[in-house]
Image (cartoon, rainbow, N blue to C red):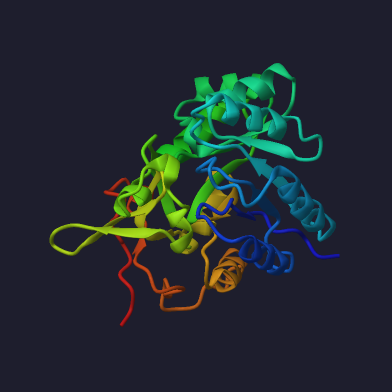
Amino acid sequence: MTTPPTLQLSLGPVLFYWTREHYANFYREAADWPVEIITLGETVCSRRRDMKLDDWLGIGRELSQAGKQIVLASQTLIESEADLRDLRKICDNGNFIVEANDQSALQLLSHAGLPFIAGAALNLYNPATLGVMNRAGMQRWQAPVEMSRDDLAQLIADGHQAGVNQPCEVFAYGHLPLAWSSRCFTARRHQKSKDRCQFVCQKYPEGLVLRTQESRDVFTLNGIQTLSSACQDLRHELTTMTNMGVSVARLSPRAEGMAEVVHAFDQARNGSLPPPDPLTLVEVGICDGYWYGRPGMDNTRPQAN
């Protein structure tokens, strides 16, 4: 019998706005990838309505039959009563555990006595907060994306001392989610209002790059969400994560080349990270600065020529 890996891999929710066909094809392939956990749902914008809750539940049931642990993610920025109605339906789905990405989801889930995953946007920075989440029903928590390795190691240790032993998940690959706004930057780029955006963000399945006047890539615009321009890549840190008590490494989906990313991380967690380190998985810049307590866009391990 095969021994399960100490460090699990999770596939985060798709942050970008894809077509229904793209979602279907992506998750059909993901069923065969070496990831243990898959998080589904729209976390960015309520106007992205191609996928309904029933669609996500259907995909979740299929992936569950393939042996995956399924999580439903809540929207990160709740702006209206309609958003709250949708959130209530997610929390009451009756099938899968919910990842709470804002205080509204946290309140609904805790008051209903339902277990939940604490998303990174909840900003859990100290053991006292972890204790509150623990008592509310938290089953796993995600470290803030800007938290350094040393600070996280201390937080995990302090949490254990305070009796909080739920697994910790780290954002290990992908464009880092940095901020959310009530304004849609992609719509503004096309000189459209947010309410009449004509869903222009679907033209950018991996976001819209924002450059400085010096032509340096700094951010990726994704509707109301701002992401890092470069992709965080912590493959070389998986052993360190395991040793410090991290249980899950999250990989954020990309429109192209994601199978290669997943298999590279699977090899890395099993000690088969080939030189040079890191390899370029996709045509995009790499960063890991936050992990080392430096500016997030820094890359401490320049790519080989």
Residue 154 at least partly seen:
yes
From the viewer's perspective, tell me whether residue 298 is left or right of residue 110.
left
Residue 159 vertical placement versus 151 (above, below): above
Question: Which quadrant of the structure image shows residue 46?
Answer: top right
Residue 85 vertical placement versus 231 (above, below): above
What quarter of the picture does the N terminus occupy? Answer: bottom right
In the rendered picture of this protein, how many numbered marks are placed on residues? 0
Residue 12 vertical placement versus 1 (above, below): above
What quarter of the picture does the C terminus occupy? Answer: bottom left
Q: Which percent across, then down, holds residue 175?
A: 42, 56
Observer-nearest of 49 and 282: 49
Q: Which percent across, then down, holds residue 133?
A: 60, 24
Q: Name the residue located 81 percent from the left edge and 34 percent from the top edge.
A: 94
Q: Name the residue located 81 percent from the left edge and 61 percent from the top edge.
A: 66
Q: Which percent across, then down, holds residue 149?
A: 42, 45
From the viewer's perspective, tell me whether residue 110 is left or right of residue 173.
right
Residue 146 at least partly seen:
no
Question: Which quadrant of the structure image shows residue 178?
Answer: top left
